[in-house]
Image (tube, grey):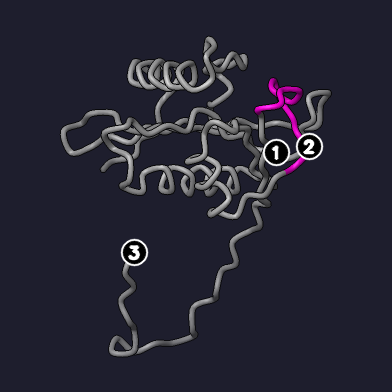
Amino acid sequence: MNIRHVSFGHPDAVKLNDRVQLEYAARYGDEGDVTPLDPTMFEPPQGLYLIVYDDQDTPVATGGWRAQDANDQGYADGDAEIKRMYVVPEARGRGLSRRVLAALEDDARAAGRVRMVLETGTKQPEAISLYMSSGYELCAKFGHYRFDELSRCYAKPLAAVATVPAPASTSAGSLTPMSSA
Protein backbone atom coordinates (compact mmCIF):
# COMPACT_ATOMS: atom_id res chain seq x y z
CA MET A 1 0.00 0.00 0.00
CA ASN A 2 1.17 3.47 -0.89
CA ILE A 3 -0.28 6.68 0.62
CA ARG A 4 0.06 9.73 -1.63
CA HIS A 5 -0.74 13.40 -1.13
CA VAL A 6 -2.95 14.56 -4.02
CA SER A 7 -5.28 17.41 -4.84
CA PHE A 8 -8.95 17.03 -3.95
CA GLY A 9 -9.52 17.68 -7.66
CA HIS A 10 -7.23 14.81 -8.77
CA PRO A 11 -9.08 12.33 -11.07
CA ASP A 12 -8.65 9.47 -8.56
CA ALA A 13 -9.96 11.68 -5.75
CA VAL A 14 -13.00 12.53 -7.88
CA LYS A 15 -13.64 8.81 -8.59
CA LEU A 16 -13.42 7.88 -4.92
CA ASN A 17 -15.58 10.85 -3.95
CA ASP A 18 -18.22 9.66 -6.44
CA ARG A 19 -18.12 6.21 -4.83
CA VAL A 20 -18.50 7.53 -1.29
CA GLN A 21 -21.39 9.74 -2.42
CA LEU A 22 -23.16 6.66 -3.79
CA GLU A 23 -22.65 4.92 -0.45
CA TYR A 24 -24.04 7.92 1.44
CA ALA A 25 -27.06 7.97 -0.86
CA ALA A 26 -27.65 4.24 -0.33
CA ARG A 27 -27.38 4.53 3.46
CA TYR A 28 -29.35 7.74 3.90
CA GLY A 29 -31.68 7.66 0.88
CA ASP A 30 -30.71 11.11 -0.39
CA GLU A 31 -28.22 12.80 -2.70
CA GLY A 32 -25.19 12.20 -0.50
CA ASP A 33 -23.09 14.70 1.41
CA VAL A 34 -23.78 18.20 0.13
CA THR A 35 -21.24 19.95 2.36
CA PRO A 36 -19.65 22.66 0.18
CA LEU A 37 -16.06 21.64 -0.57
CA ASP A 38 -13.45 23.28 -2.75
CA PRO A 39 -10.14 21.64 -3.72
CA THR A 40 -8.19 24.60 -2.35
CA MET A 41 -9.49 23.78 1.17
CA PHE A 42 -7.18 20.76 1.23
CA GLU A 43 -3.98 22.52 0.14
CA PRO A 44 -1.14 22.62 2.68
CA PRO A 45 -0.69 24.16 5.14
CA GLN A 46 -4.45 24.63 5.52
CA GLY A 47 -5.28 21.01 4.75
CA LEU A 48 -4.22 17.78 3.15
CA TYR A 49 -5.83 15.17 0.92
CA LEU A 50 -4.56 11.59 0.76
CA ILE A 51 -5.24 8.56 -1.42
CA VAL A 52 -4.10 5.04 -0.65
CA TYR A 53 -3.08 2.97 -3.68
CA ASP A 54 -2.79 -0.81 -3.63
CA ASP A 55 0.03 -2.83 -5.16
CA GLN A 56 -1.61 -2.58 -8.60
CA ASP A 57 -1.72 1.25 -8.28
CA THR A 58 -5.50 1.19 -7.85
CA PRO A 59 -6.94 3.88 -5.55
CA VAL A 60 -8.62 2.12 -2.62
CA ALA A 61 -8.94 4.64 0.22
CA THR A 62 -9.06 8.36 0.78
CA GLY A 63 -9.31 11.05 3.41
CA GLY A 64 -8.52 14.68 3.98
CA TRP A 65 -8.53 17.46 6.51
CA ARG A 66 -9.21 21.16 6.19
CA ALA A 67 -8.52 23.99 8.62
CA GLN A 68 -11.42 25.53 10.49
CA ASP A 69 -11.57 28.34 12.98
CA ALA A 70 -14.35 29.74 15.17
CA ASN A 71 -17.39 30.63 13.09
CA ASP A 72 -21.20 30.56 13.09
CA GLN A 73 -21.23 26.85 12.16
CA GLY A 74 -19.84 25.79 15.54
CA TYR A 75 -16.16 25.28 14.79
CA ALA A 76 -13.47 26.39 17.26
CA ASP A 77 -10.16 28.11 16.61
CA GLY A 78 -7.51 25.58 15.65
CA ASP A 79 -9.88 22.88 14.38
CA ALA A 80 -8.86 20.48 11.62
CA GLU A 81 -11.94 18.88 10.07
CA ILE A 82 -11.76 15.41 8.57
CA LYS A 83 -13.60 15.01 5.27
CA ARG A 84 -14.16 12.17 2.82
CA MET A 85 -12.72 9.27 4.80
CA TYR A 86 -13.54 6.27 2.65
CA VAL A 87 -12.29 2.78 1.87
CA VAL A 88 -13.70 0.89 -1.13
CA PRO A 89 -15.66 -2.19 0.01
CA GLU A 90 -13.21 -4.63 -1.57
CA ALA A 91 -10.30 -3.19 0.49
CA ARG A 92 -12.01 -2.94 3.89
CA GLY A 93 -10.71 -4.80 6.91
CA ARG A 94 -7.03 -4.09 6.18
CA GLY A 95 -6.54 -1.18 8.57
CA LEU A 96 -6.38 1.41 5.80
CA SER A 97 -8.75 3.86 7.50
CA ARG A 98 -6.60 3.81 10.65
CA ARG A 99 -3.47 4.51 8.59
CA VAL A 100 -5.13 7.42 6.79
CA LEU A 101 -6.58 8.78 10.03
CA ALA A 102 -3.17 8.67 11.75
CA ALA A 103 -1.50 10.40 8.78
CA LEU A 104 -4.16 13.13 8.78
CA GLU A 105 -3.80 13.67 12.53
CA ASP A 106 0.00 13.88 12.26
CA ASP A 107 -0.18 16.38 9.42
CA ALA A 108 -2.80 18.58 11.12
CA ARG A 109 -0.75 18.57 14.31
CA ALA A 110 2.37 19.56 12.36
CA ALA A 111 0.37 22.39 10.76
CA GLY A 112 -0.42 23.76 14.23
CA ARG A 113 -4.00 22.58 14.50
CA VAL A 114 -5.08 21.77 18.07
CA ARG A 115 -8.22 19.66 17.63
CA MET A 116 -9.36 17.16 15.00
CA VAL A 117 -13.12 17.16 14.40
CA LEU A 118 -15.44 15.21 12.16
CA GLU A 119 -19.08 14.69 11.38
CA THR A 120 -20.54 11.31 10.52
CA GLY A 121 -23.98 9.78 10.66
CA THR A 122 -25.83 7.20 12.70
CA LYS A 123 -26.10 4.95 9.64
CA GLN A 124 -22.31 4.60 9.51
CA PRO A 125 -21.61 2.43 12.57
CA GLU A 126 -18.24 1.33 11.17
CA ALA A 127 -17.08 4.94 11.05
CA ILE A 128 -18.35 5.64 14.56
CA SER A 129 -16.53 2.56 15.85
CA LEU A 130 -13.28 3.61 14.12
CA TYR A 131 -13.36 7.11 15.55
CA MET A 132 -14.34 6.12 19.07
CA SER A 133 -11.65 3.41 19.17
CA SER A 134 -9.16 6.05 17.97
CA GLY A 135 -9.82 8.40 20.89
CA TYR A 136 -12.57 10.59 19.46
CA GLU A 137 -15.45 11.65 21.71
CA LEU A 138 -18.88 13.06 20.97
CA CYS A 139 -18.85 16.84 20.93
CA ALA A 140 -21.21 19.73 20.24
CA LYS A 141 -22.48 19.58 16.67
CA PHE A 142 -20.92 21.78 14.03
CA GLY A 143 -20.87 22.20 10.27
CA HIS A 144 -23.37 21.72 7.49
CA TYR A 145 -25.33 18.92 9.21
CA ARG A 146 -25.34 20.34 12.75
CA PHE A 147 -29.16 20.40 12.86
CA ASP A 148 -29.68 16.92 11.37
CA GLU A 149 -30.88 14.32 13.88
CA LEU A 150 -28.83 11.59 12.14
CA SER A 151 -25.61 13.59 12.46
CA ARG A 152 -22.96 12.86 15.10
CA CYS A 153 -19.92 15.03 15.67
CA TYR A 154 -16.69 13.89 17.28
CA ALA A 155 -13.49 15.59 18.40
CA LYS A 156 -10.02 14.62 19.56
CA PRO A 157 -7.34 16.95 20.95
CA LEU A 158 -4.16 17.02 18.90
CA ALA A 159 -1.65 17.19 21.72
CA ALA A 160 1.92 17.77 20.71
CA VAL A 161 3.88 14.58 20.39
CA ALA A 162 6.47 14.39 23.14
CA THR A 163 9.99 13.79 21.97
CA VAL A 164 12.50 11.93 24.07
CA PRO A 165 16.01 13.36 23.87
CA ALA A 166 18.63 10.95 22.64
CA PRO A 167 21.11 9.72 25.22
CA ALA A 168 24.43 11.56 25.28
CA SER A 169 26.25 8.48 24.07
CA THR A 170 25.25 4.99 23.04
CA SER A 171 27.11 1.95 22.02
CA ALA A 172 26.05 0.14 18.86
CA GLY A 173 25.27 -3.00 20.88
CA SER A 174 22.80 -1.24 23.17
CA LEU A 175 20.33 -0.16 20.52
CA THR A 176 17.23 -2.29 20.03
CA PRO A 177 15.55 -2.20 16.61
CA MET A 178 11.95 -1.07 16.71
CA SER A 179 9.25 -2.60 14.59
CA SER A 180 6.46 -0.60 13.06
CA ALA A 181 2.89 -1.76 13.05
Residue at 32% of width from left, 32% of height from top?
89
- Is residue 129 positioned above or below 27 on the image? below
**Amino acid beneath label 1:** Asp
Local crowd at mark 1 within 10 Å, few (<14), some, or many (≥20)? Answer: many
Dot 3 corresponds to which residue? Answer: 180
Magenta stretch: give its range: 139-150
Q: Residue 154's quadrant in the figure? A: top right
What is the number of the mark on residue 79?
A: 1
Residue lying at the far top of the rendered structure: 31
Q: Is residue 141 magenta?
A: yes
Q: Residue 93's quadrant in the figure? A: top left
**Amino acid beneath label 2:** Ala
Asked whether disc 2 touches disc 1, contact meaning CB atoms under 8 Å apart, the reply is yes
Residue at 51% of width from left, 42% of height from top?
104
Local crowd at mark 2 within 10 Å, few (<14), some, or many (≥20)? Answer: some
- Please state the horizontal and vertical placement of residue 123, each as a whole percent of the image: 54, 31
Depth check: give the residue in front, 109 or 123: 123
- Please state the horizontal and vertical placement of residue 101, each as a whole percent of the image: 48, 44
**Amino acid beneath label 3:** Ser
What is the number of the mark on residue 113?
A: none
Residue lying at the far left of the rendered structure: 56
How far, Cα to Cα, is label 1 from label 3? 29 Å
Please state, as top left, top right, bottom left or bottom right, where the N terminus lies in the image. top left
Depth check: give the residue in front, 14 or 132: 132
Dot 2 corresponds to which residue? Answer: 76
Residue at 58% of width from left, 43% of height from top?
108
Q: Is residue 135 magenta?
A: no
